[in-house]
Image (tube, rainbow, N blue to C red):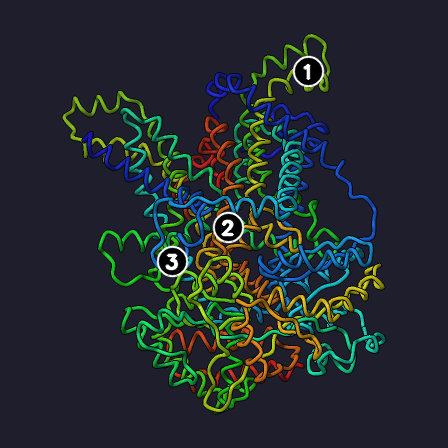
Amino acid sequence: MTKTHQRKRLPAHRNPIQALLGLLLAWTVACPGLLVAAERTLTVTMRLDESEWRVMRAEILPRFEKECQCTVVPRDVPPEQLAQLLQAMARAGRMEIDVFAQDNMRLLELVSIGVVQDLSAYESRIAPQVSKVLLETGRIQGRLYFFPYRPNVQIAYYNAQRFERYGLSPPGTWEELLHVARVFKEKEGVGRVLFQAWGGAPTVTQVYEWITSAGGDPLVLTHPGTVKTFRFLQELWPYLSPDSRQAKWDTTNQFLAQESAYLAQNWPFGVRLLIQEYGKTAIKTYSGWAGPARKAHVIGGEVLGIPVGTPNVPLALDFLRFMQSKGIQELLTVRLGWPSLRTDAHGRVEAWMRPYFKAVTEALTHGIVRKNLPYWPEYEKLVNEAFVRTVVRGEAVEGTLHALQARLERVQGRY
Amino acid sequence: MPFRLGWRGFRGAIDVLFLAPLTLYILGLTLWPVLSTMALSFQDRRSGSFPTLANYQAVVEHFEFWDALYNTLFISVVGLSLELCLGLVMALCLSVPFRGRGVARALMLIPLGVPTIVSAANMRYIFGTVGYLNETLHQLGLLEIPIDWTSGGARTLMAVVAADLWKVTPLVMLILLAGLESIPGELYEAAVTDGAGAWQRFRYVTLPLLKPAITAALIIRGIDAFRIFALPLTLVGRSTPVLSTYTYFEYVDYQNPYTSAASATILLVMILATTIAYLQIAGTEEVIS
Amino acid sequence: MRPLTYLAMSAMAAFLLIPVYLMVKISISVPGEVFTQHPTLLIHDVTLDHWRQIVTGGMLWPPLKKSLTVATATALLALALSAPAAYVIARMPRGWKYTTLLILFFTRMFPEVGIALPMAIRFIEWGLFDTNLGLTLAHLVRTLPITAWILVGSFEAIPREIEEAAGVDGAGHGRTLLRVILPLALPGLTVAALFAWLLSWEEFTFAVYLSLASRTLPLQVYYYVYQGNWFLTATYTTIITIPVLILTYALQRYLKAGTLAGAIK
């Protein structure tokens, strides 16, 4: 290497660079000093949007801290990685999570790897006002592992200004949806109706809902209703927003905010973000459109569980009960617009939010609960493949679905 | 080189002791993981039997794998050619003195000082359907209907290439510039006295003498182009997988470490084969010095 | 020729600066200026809301602390592991040296997704998953070859005669190393440490495989990218970029092809 070059140059830069090294060393020395004082803490993981986190951290969790004389440490963990994290902590023998919230479609994997506590013994503590339908989502093979705390359902967002400009009204059926998508594409040259085609859970949830609303069985890819759904999606695809391929639950808000899309289905958490933070008051919501057979809305939402190995079980149980309590459920409704799981919680949502909340309650009346499948990740992968191949690439619907059905049956046979 | 224990000046135990930590680390935490990825790729997911080709079969049957393979090759080939050309032009511009050259050189360093994940995030602002590229084109009156840059297809691959160019061209430029500056000026003077024009000087003096630098740039960048990960993951997500992101999605989204290991192994073999083949042609010493 | 050069240079400058400009602009823009069908290219309304949200919202310190801790630990461990080896390699005859450096270079050919996968699986069993130590160990994989590379260069630059003279004066091996070689190599060691720090600070692949609940700053960026929240993304990216830019300029004299091979990604 260049010997002389280095010898000449290095000393000139010695001082500033060594000052930086000094800083490095100082940090190393200072860091271990930041030990946390020992006190009662409860670590809770959830996956919330930033605006939801703000309410949770500022208004909900402090109440519990006051009640239990402890500190709540909130952490954000995505649902698809929770199982891995819990397994890691369980194997390492240091369970650092006391309570977790999990998407109700991803419960079985937690049970099958044995990282959640069986809460059946505490079922009697659940208030009778908690909806029975929701309670059942936490029961697996006859044992109650999870406590519900948040029901959820997707609604349709639309940009009222843009709809008015072309004299359109929000679609109530598939035919109207196709018409609206066509009109936008013709008028603006680019599709403005968004479908969450990113892949994975967002796409599969939406496809599942549409298949059900067409009278199909989502678990049978060759069912006439399923075939009909994919046919319709294929027909609709050219008129959809090109951002669809980038759209999932989070990014859908961005495309609505940018007015890159004028109509999209999504969970209600976008309301606060779009209306309050981004000031997009032109965006309105309604419950959505019906399929050829019926109206169907997948009941999503989250349940709470307690991992095996946490030393704070009593405190964790207190937290579960706290989240289900009438006061908190009402507060969640008032501040976040979350529907309640209790029949007796009647939090009055803030005035600006009422029309949005109405869409949610209306959609919930058409709720459907998905089965907990042990092979859900494989199912997701196959539906995703079906979607990309038939809808995005335009391959023949029936042939593709038949081939994939054969693969699905092979997977089902293994369980 | 004759084989014997140690080298001239080998000091026995002390040298072994000094070399040990680094050697053990590389064996334990670089070589071992690579080998265990390979082992994993030949293991059956359910029965654990070994060896099996089931994972490779699953991978090649999966339609997105072929997309990923094609996309990786496209991005590598097109990206490498463009960044070499652009890097060479920039290096040639910067090798002659002019007022403001210092500023220009300082500007060149900016992309080097911006982490990959940051540049990928920035590119999302530019290539969004409602992004700044479309808006600029719109204001220039060149664009009526917004273009979707990131929803798949050749356009998306070009967007990834362009985004990658921003980050890595200055690196290529620096390597080539170092090469240019090592060419003695007398050679050009001699060429001028022989009556060579600008193009001939470039073709018969610069290019041959720049070959080591070009080789170095090609290999260094070629490897990284095959391994490209954070940029496509962030900029285009699942609409346009490359081999690295495909490997990642198999593991994280579908929780299948076995197929993930299989596609990682395929990627590794591709990189090794290409690099070794290239080194065979171009020689190794140039990369090191 | 001249005006053409300037034109090319200005075009280049714009190309290089615009993404960085947009990042800073978005981090201080009001949402209405960015989230509309026709976002403005110039800054009109300035707001510090996004910065305030991050700094006072309590979401900055944990990832910042993790990034700082891991980067610093990586830098120091990289020195401790690679400096002795580099010293020996620098004293090897040419053929040996090139072979060794070539082997170091070859480790860069392994795709990181392939290294990170078994690490993630094993680290879960060893209790290193999602910990600072685990991530530091992973970051050393990409930093060690580069620090070794840099250090071989700087040890080579120390003339052997100095060492031999110290030996003649009666100083033992250990004393020579500590009193003579180490001070002379200090600038090189510092540069290597800072490079290692940078590499760890901006690292993404290993971090995304080996962390979950405790995120580093680059992961925080990825997280906000997929929340579709441009403002918080821009703010976090600005925070990450500042130290990297400063260090890059401080280290620019040492940016040579050899180190560049891996140092800058």
Q: Is residue B36 above or below residue C191?
A: below
Chain of the residue that carries numbered disc 2 in the rendered image: C
Chain of the residue that carries numbered disc 3 in the rendered image: C
- Whole-angstrom CA distance, mark 1 to mark 3, is 64 Å
Q: Which residue is mark 1?
A: C179
Classify 10 Å Cα crowding around label 1: few (below 14), some (14-19), many (20 and above).
Answer: few
Q: Do the residues marked 2 and 3 share a common chain?
A: yes
User: Which amino acid type corresponds to the residue marked 2 in the rendered image?
Assistant: Thr
Classify 10 Å Cα crowding around label 3: few (below 14), some (14-19), many (20 and above).
Answer: some
User: Which amino acid type corresponds to the residue marked 3 in the rendered image?
Assistant: Thr
Q: Nearer the viewer, mark 2 or mark 1?
A: 2
Q: Which residue is mark 3?
A: C36
Residue C233 has which mark? 2
Tell me the quarter of the image containing the C terminus of chain A: bottom right
Chain of the residue that carries numbered disc 1 in the rendered image: C
Instruction: Give coordinates of residue A6: x percent, y percent.
Output: 49, 21
Q: Nearer the viewer, mark 2 or mark 3?
A: 3
Mark earlier in primary sequence (2, 3): 3
Residue C102 has which mark? none
Mark earlier in primary sequence (2, 1): 1
For the view shown, which residue lies furthest in the top direction?
A: C169
Q: Is residue C176 above or below residue A149?
A: above
User: Which amino acid type corresponds to the residue marked 1 in the rendered image?
Assistant: Arg
Whether pointer 2 and pointer 3 mark residues with C-beta atoms closer than 8 Å, the reply is: no
Mark 2: which secondary structure? helix
